Amino acid sequence: MSIRVYALLMPGFLIAPQVVAQVNAPLETDFDIESVIVVTPLADTDSQIDTEPLLGEISVTGTSEKVLENGVRIRARGTLRLQADHPNRPAGIGGFGPNTASPVGAFSGLSAAAPIEASDIRARLETAYLQVDGGYGEMRVGKDLGVGARFHEGAKSVLSHARLDSALLDPTGLSAVRTRHDLTGPSLKVSYASPRILGLRGGLSFTPAADADGLDRRPMAGTGGISPETENAIEVALNGTRRLRESGWRFDVGLAWSTADVSNIGLATPYGQVETWSAGTRIEKDDWTLGVSWLESDNGLPQSAYSAWSTGLHRNAYDTDFSIEFGQAQDHGAQLDSQSWRVGAARKFGDSTRLAIGYINDQTERINQNWDSQGVVVEITLSQKIVEITGN
């Protein structure tokens, strides 16, 4: 049996003594559906990449959970998503140059190749994992984000999908700021997270092959026929939280490091080991929240480092959320300098409807080229629980 198979099966052997046949507790299962529409009714674009007036996503999430008599919680979770994103930037992958063949950054997904064109509608099973949570911590096995992304801390945004940092839907096609430490996307992996002790929680993830073709991350995708093959990815993360009850201040901090072996699919390129670092914090006081995050990766290529940072201020007042965000990114391999900002407001209408309106601006520079897109976006979110079952 290969080392990869052992790595994925080992958590089952470790937690088996806790998960004994205790069937008295009920099995709770529910299904939720969420749809998000991003409309850009007003836009001013000076770019070779057109602004998309309508983007959207529909997701269905199912969760089954059972709590055993010894307190161990067993959970199975799956999410199916259908998405129409910018056709030039599927899952953030993008080319911004004239080259017919150029290596893409193993983390950033950016290159100096020509802009790509992909189907603007894709469906993927993004999440499918089994989780066991007990007194010794939490173990997950399956398609899921690694601890680097799960332990992320940073700015809050009123835009859930068209947000500035690590956007899920990109109306302008120019979004390049990514500080969420997601190296492997929804690839098959095993993760362990410790219990929170004195406000601190550690985590470790191992991904044998980062081969997921996800909606938000495509680790093996390229832009000019040259794609990275990322294997044996290890992520280590730490999350801390501290609330000062007398003053009302709350501090959350996230730190992460990851590394993986990177080789080439296609033409010969000097891919090697990829290493990525990130840090972020979120500070809350009453209705105010300040977030700051930073990431740097060598992209698995010489002289191709990617770095990004973002910050944002969020406030809730009059039953409405307000936020303003700013961020910058630089990719030496693609020779890109980018900056973005967002300002907007959002409000809930009942339990299932949320409306957000924002003004966005994305700018990207490469050598003697400047691309600039700005406009108004309207983000409508509808969510509803469609099935809830309790049984044995």
Image (tube, rainbow, N blue to C red):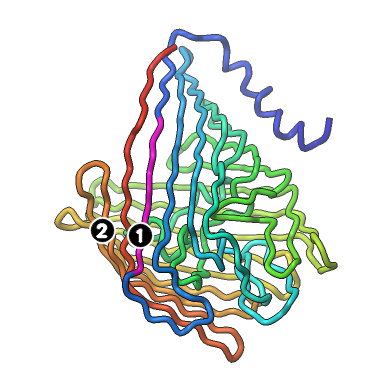
Task: Classify mark 1: helix, strand or loop.
Answer: loop
Name the residue located 62 percent from the left edge and 74 percent from the top edge: 115
Dot label at residue 305 = none
Name the residue located 70 percent from the left edge and 56 percent from the top edge: 220
What's the amino acid at mark 1? Leu
> In the image, is residue 62 part of the stretch drawn in magenta?
no
Residue named by callout 1: 159
Task: Classify mark 2: helix, strand or loop.
Answer: strand
> In the image, is residue 38 part of the stretch drawn in magenta?
yes
- x%, y% of residue 68? 47, 15
The N terminus, quarter of image:
top right
- x%, y% of residue 39? 35, 64
- Which secondary structure is most common in the magenta stretch? strand
How many neighbours does mark 1 have within 10 angstroms: few (below 14), some (14-19), or many (20 or more)?
A: many
Above or below residue 16? Residue 150 is below
Name the residue located 24 percent from the left edge and 52 percent from the top edge: 247
217 horizontally vs 248: left or right: right
Above or below residue 385? Residue 248 is below
Which of the 4 image quarters holds residue 323?
bottom left
| Disc with the residue nearer the chain's start (2 vs 1) | 1
- x%, y% of residue 3? 80, 36
Name the residue located 35 percent from the left edge and 68 percent from the top edge: 40
Residue named by callout 2: 346
Q: Distance between the residues labelled 2 and 1?
A: 8 Å
Which of the 4 image quarters holds residue 337?
bottom right
What's the amino acid at mark 2? Ala
Circles 2 and 1, Cβ within 8 Å, touching? The answer is: yes
Q: Give the range drawn in magenta.
A: 31-40
- x%, y% of residue 76? 52, 28
244 horizontally vs 329: left or right: left
